[in-house]
Image (cartoon, coloured by chain):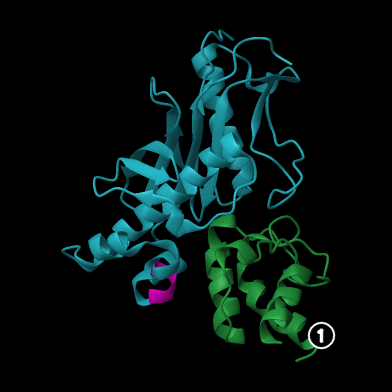
Chain colours: A cyan, B green
Amino acid sequence: MDARPRSERFIGNDVVDLGEPAALTALGRPRLIARVCCEQERARIAEAPTEEAALRLFWSHFAAKEAAYKAVSKREGPTVFAHRRFVVDAGLSLVSYGAHRLSLSLRQAAHAVHAVADLGPGGPPPHAEVVARDPADAPSTAARRALLATVAAAEGLDPADLEVFRPPLAGSWDGHGPPVLLLRGRERPDQLSLSHDGRYVAYAWLPCPGLAG
Amino acid sequence: MNQQEVMSKVLSILEPFCNTADGITGAKMETTILGDLKVNSARLVDVVLEFEEVFDIEISDEDADNVRTVGDAVNLIIAAKS
């Protein structure tokens, strides 16, 4: 295990493809909105000036909560994902969960929303990107490739020396824990988060302080 | 409804969310929803809502969070209907 300091920050990201059929029909599904959003959030969505704005606002809340959940789960271990308990502020810049306050960065693209949530003492923003996926690529493979290309370029590394690994984790939804970065087979304490939906993959990456390739 | 009937309905609900080449073919009680059926985790809310609507039940967030396999869903629904 790397002896360099571990991050005190925990990040999560989530991308939503606004062109997906399930995304386009969200406003016609009040039970979905009620399950995901608390009362104040539902009120803001209902007050959006246009249907398109309301749709984008709902999915921005959804992506924010998914991103925040990933960050909190890294800090606290397997966590019940009750969307309404992750509360997004009116400025879309903060997510609250119990005593936790996560800073939120939302990126709006023509056909996607991308949220990055950051739990911890603050600092430089994570590297984050949304990438259109080659349909021939498996989503998780494409997300990992996009992330590793950025890490390699930023640190002058050979992408072939980098790997994303999800260690086993009892109690997690799919038996695996959050992704970790391996450099030549050794785990680095960087924070990473991967996401994919429809046509897009996305990542967020926070190098651990003091790391230099 | 017996277990087989519930399982059949559960699988029909899951099928459109599957991202595997074989869909729900061969799915059993132990089949995992995220791992084996490759349901996108972002669609789990939709899956839970479908369970509620089709079976006319309410599923709490805590109960939903414990549904990892087809069998977990089947057993939850049977318990909710009894």
Toward the viewer: B7 or B66? B66
Residue B44 lies in the magenta-colored region: no
Identify the magenta region.
A29-33
**Residue A191: horizontal and vertical position, in percent?**
55, 27
**Residue A55: horizontal and vertical position, in percent?**
31, 63
Q: Kindly give the residue lying farthest to the left in the view shown.
A: A49
**Occupied quadrant, residue A1:** top right
Q: Residues within 10 Å of mark 1 (few under 14, many from 20)?
A: few
Q: Residue at x 56, y 10 (%)?
A: A211
Q: Secondary structure at mark 1?
A: helix
Please state if A120 lies on the left or on the right of A45 as rendered. Answer: right
Q: Kindly give the residue lying farthest to the front in the view shown.
A: A99
Please state if A151 lies on the left or on the right of B30 as rendered. Answer: left
Q: Residue at x 74, y 41 (%)?
A: A169
Chief SS of the magenta region: helix
Q: Residue at x 38, y 68 (%)?
A: A24
**Occupied quadrant, residue A85:** bottom left
Q: Give the residue pinned by disc 1.
A: B4
